[in-house]
Structures are given as C-alpha cells and as structure tokens.
C-alpha cells in the first residue's frame, strides 16, 4: 500500500510542471498585455495607415513601452460612451506568446475623450495626460484635418505636392506639433497652363511669391498678386516655376509653416468662348463653343439670372462644345449673361431671349379612364425612373448635320409649348414636344442621324424609341405601334424607326415627338428651319 502511494505521488510530481505550464499559458492568454511578453506592435490609424514596431529596435521599444504604460494607467469603466461607438478607431495588434491580441483605441481631439477596448472587450478610460502624449505624436495626425500638407492646384487642373515643406498643426492640449512630411523633392512635374498661371491651395497661405524663369532669363520674381497673364505672354512656351508659400502662426489658426513648389508650366494661348447665335426664343437652345481649352473639367459656368442647368462640354476637333437650353420652366428674362471661367481667364457673353408668342389653350376630351391610367403622378415618376440612365448617358460624338426634318409628313395636333387642357379630368399641362395628326401605318422617321439608345414600352409613353444625336441632344418618339430598330443601331436622317400607334397616353392614333438636351425639352422648330448654329473655326 505504501509503495502504491509513493508511486502515485511520483506520477503527480512528474505532471506538476506540465500543469503549471498549462495554467501559466491560460493565464497569459487571458491577462492584459505586458511589456515583458510583447514582441511587436502594429498600429493602424483611422485612415488605414499602418505603423510596425519591433521590440528589437530601441525606438520601437519605447513606443511599445508607452502603449503599455498608457494601458496600465487606464481605469476600467462599464462601457464606451455612446458618442464614440460609431467613431473610427486606432487598431493595435500586440504580438505576445505567438498570438495577436487586438486592442481598439478611441481617440478624439479632446484628450478627456480617450478610451480603449481590450481583446476581451473590456472598456478602459485613458488618462488624459497619456492621451495628450499620444495625440502629439505623428501616429495621431490622422485625427487632425490641419495636419495634412497643403497641396497646390495649378490653373484648376493639376494638383502638386510640396517640393519641400515645414509644417505644424495644433494637437493634444492645443500646442503646435511638427508634421512628418518632408516633401516630394521632384522638380520634373509638368503642367498645362492656358493663358495665365492660377494658383489655388488647399490651405490658403498668408504670403506667396512666384519666380518664373525661361532658361537663365528671369521673367517674373515677386508676390503672386502682381502676376498677370501678360507676364508669361499668350504664345506657347515652357517656363520653370518656383512658388514659395507661408502660413503664419496666429490666434485661431490650426496650422502654420512654409512650403516650396517647383514645376514646369507649359503655357498655351488663353481660352476663349463664343455663342453660336446671340438671340433665341425661350424654349430654344444655344451652342457655346470654347477654344484653347486644355481640360473641359476646368470650365466654370455661371448665368445671371440662373438657368438651373449645368452645361456639359464635348470635344469637337480643336474646340469644346456645349448645348445650353433656355427652358420654358424658367421665369422669362429678356437676356442672360453667361460668365465662363477657365484656367484663370473669365469671359462674359450675353444671350438675348425673346418671348414665345402667346397662344390659347388646347382643349382635349380624352376619356378620363385613359388619362388616369396613363398620365398620373406615379406613372410619370415611373417613366422618369426608367429613362433616367438614358437621359444621363450621352454620346460624345456629334452625329447630326445640317437641318432636322419632321418625324412624319403630317400636320401638328398639339405644338411645342402649348397648354393642353384635359377637360374630362380638369387638368392642364404644357406640351414639351409636338403631337401630330397621323393615320394608321404612317412611318416614323429619324429627324437626324444618331444612335438608338432606347427601345421599349412604358405606361406613359407607350412604345418608345430614343435616338442620341450626340452632345446631349436626343429625339424621343412615343405612342408607336411597331418598332423596327434596336438599341445600338446607327440611323441616318429619314431612316424608318417604326409605325405610329395609340399606345400610352394617346387619344387614338398619334405620334408624340420630343427633342431634349440632357433631359430638358427644347423646341424643334428652329433646327428644322435653320439647323444648329455653332461657332467652329476662326
């Protein structure tokens, strides 16, 4: 018996180290991270930038020590404040015992609002002094908008990072701390400039100087405010440009510093703009042409009074072109002043607009059940939704030429811009197209060359074909009974699209035809008589 007890004790003694090691492992996995066991730390900021710290490196070791001290000095709380739960957080992965422990740190620019959640989802409030220490490090810069280095936009087109920079921003308890940016040190950047050199900064400087040279010849060397287009001329040349900007330290400012930008400006003649005609009737459109435009996205268009429309520009050889409708929905104005800015140059053009001749209402006795079924609010909304992508997508090639024709050789029933009174339901609407008196089997013709971009049937329109003539100009053919084209077909002026019908919102056999520019209905009459007037040349 005694022998058996001795054997049992020996066996237990053999397993004690194993049990102890296992218990220590379990305890280590559940315990907070400790500096002596952490091998490395990977920190990811709120913008996704990652920083790796290995304990073998002395500087990295100090960062790890700081985080452990910050953790140890924190106070356990019940939960994360509600206002922080949706915030982005810093993620810290501590490598310990060959396993990653993930902690989430919730910092704001207010040091008293700092918390972390450990790998077991326990929440701790971070000491505000420790929070300040962290907030003044480069690793917390993503919390501060003012920490971002100021970029320079050259002539509204190209963004340039500083060649060299010394930048500070307010952090922590409100003191200025240096940013870690050193600049790009790249002088090879080349930017197109049209007419004048326009400089725009993401943070507006207090003082800017510009030095422009051509070889060894200094063209300009002074403050930016004195620079004019005449300094660099209107002929195509390349200049070396050095820009020095300063942001002064002052009360209420969140940043200060200085930066240098160096680049080559490839200068071309300034942009200029022209109207295809100076007078139109309300409901018509005018063509705006630009010359010497390097980037259509650099064009800024304004109108006084407003036309509630943003022109879309397309390339036409060496020019850019936009079709601008003056909608019937606008309150009448006898003239509009268009202000067009491009690459530092602003030009004003005046468009005279005449009133449409007043005409009486057209009475229509379409049966109430037809109106209620094909032209109610939900039907019109469904039509707009179904055709939204068709309206928004434009062919960048101009397919039309010369004058437009009418889609059928018949007389007009309801003209463009006429007010139609539906007597059976006591409703009025302004006709945005042209309705024709047709007979069965009449063929529907394309009013000009283009690409078929929609074929289908909607409750409001009935069977419908849409042809894109380019540059945002589209023709719409509704109420058809038969369609003889498919999406993607290229059609010539006069090509057969189908047959008239009585589908959709129609009181018997009908054809409703519209001309639109990016969804804005325009009168087709002038383009049938005179074509589309546009300046291309000179």
Image (spheres, grey):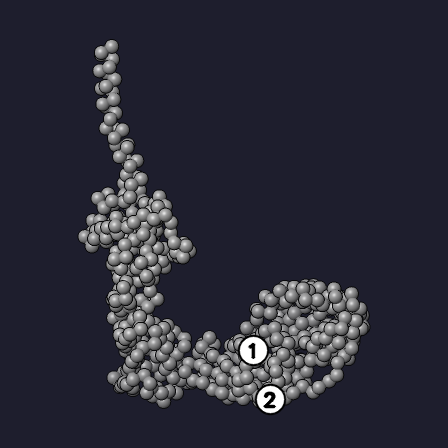
Q: Quadrant of residue 295?
A: bottom left
Per the rendering, the mark at residue 252 is none
Q: Quadrant of residue 183?
A: bottom left
Residue at the spot of label 1: 308
Q: Is residue 107 left or right of residue 425?
A: left
Q: Is residue 130 left or right of residue 471?
A: left
Q: Is residue 266 above or below residue 509?
A: below
Residue at the spot of label 2: 334
Q: Where is residue 321? Give x, y as percent.
A: 53, 80
Q: Secondary structure at mark 2?
A: loop
Q: Where is residue 414? Give x, y as percent.
A: 74, 78
Q: Between disc 1 and disc 2, whose residue precedes?
A: 1
Residue at point 71%, 64% (across, down): 459
Q: Could you say which is closer to the camera, residue 522 or residue 172?
A: 172
Do labels 1 and 2 touch, CB within 8 Å?
A: no
User: Hey, which residue is sitting farthest top in the picture?
Assistant: 1
């Amino acid at each position: 018996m005694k022998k058996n007890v001795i054997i049992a004790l020996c066996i237990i003694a053999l397993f004690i180290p194993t049990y102890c090691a296992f218990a220590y492992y379990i305890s280590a996995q559940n315990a907070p991270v400790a500096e002596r066991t952490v091998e490395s730390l990977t920190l990811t900021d709120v913008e996704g930038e990652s920083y790796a710290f290995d304990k073998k490196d002395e500087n990295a070791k100090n960062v790890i020590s700081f985080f452990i001290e910050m953790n140890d000095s924190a106070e356990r709380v019940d939960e994360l404040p509600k206002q922080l739960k949706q915030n982005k957080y810093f993620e810290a992965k501590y490598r310990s015992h060959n396993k990653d422990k993930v902690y989430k740190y919730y910092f704001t620019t207010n040091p008293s609002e700092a918390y972390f959640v450990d790998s077991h989802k326990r929440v701790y409030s971070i000491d505000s002094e420790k929070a300040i220490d962290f907030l003044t490090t480069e690793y917390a810069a993503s919390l501060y908008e003012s920490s971002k280095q100021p970029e320079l936009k050259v002539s509204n087109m190209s963004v340039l990072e500083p060649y060299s920079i010394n930048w500070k921003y307010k952090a922590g308890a409100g003191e200025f701390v240096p940013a870690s940016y050193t600049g790009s040190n790249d002088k090879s950047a080349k930017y197109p400039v049209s007419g004048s050199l326009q400089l725009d900064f993401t943070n507006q400087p207090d003082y800017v100087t510009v030095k422009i040279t051509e070889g060894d010849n200094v063209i300009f060397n002074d403050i930016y405010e004195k620079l004019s287009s005449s300094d660099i001329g209107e002929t195509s040349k390349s200049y070396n440009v050095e820009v020095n900007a300063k942001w002064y330290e002052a009360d209420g400012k969140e940043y200060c510093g200085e930066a240098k930008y160096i680049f080559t400006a490839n200068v071309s003649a300034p942009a200029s703009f022209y109207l295809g005609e100076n007078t139109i009737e309300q409901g018509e459109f005018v063509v705006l042409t630009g010359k010497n435009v390097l980037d259509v996205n650099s064009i800024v268009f304004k109108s006084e009074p407003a036309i509630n429309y943003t022109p879309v520009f397309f390339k036409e050889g060496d020019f850019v072109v936009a079709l601008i409708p003056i909608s019937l929905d606008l309150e009448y104005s006898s003239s509009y002043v268009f202000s067009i800015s491009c690459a530092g140059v602003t030009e004003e053009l005046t468009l005279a607009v005449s009133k449409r001749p007043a005409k009486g209402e057209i009475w229509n006795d379409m049966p109430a059940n037809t109106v209620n079924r094909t032209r109610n609010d939900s039907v019109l909304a469904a039509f707009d939704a179904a055709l939204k992508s068709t309206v928004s997508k434009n062919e960048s090639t101009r397919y039309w030429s010369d004058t437009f024709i009418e889609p059928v050789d018949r007389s007009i029933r309801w003209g463009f811009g006429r007010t139609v009174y539906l007597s059976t339901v006591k409703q009025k609407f302004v006709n945005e197209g042209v309705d024709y008196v047709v007979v069965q089997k009449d063929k529907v013709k394309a009013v000009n060359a283009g690409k078929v971009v929609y074929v289908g049937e909607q409750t409001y329109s009935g069977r419908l074909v849409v042809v894109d003539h380019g540059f945002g100009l589209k023709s719409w053919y509704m109420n058809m009974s038969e369609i003889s084209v498919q999406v993607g077909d290229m059609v010539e002026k006069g090509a057969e699209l189908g047959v008239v019908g009585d589908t959709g919102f129609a009181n018997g056999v009908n054809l409703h035809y519209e001309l639109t520019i990016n969804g804005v209905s325009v009168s087709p009459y002038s383009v049938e008589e005179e074509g589309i007037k546009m300046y291309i040349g000179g």
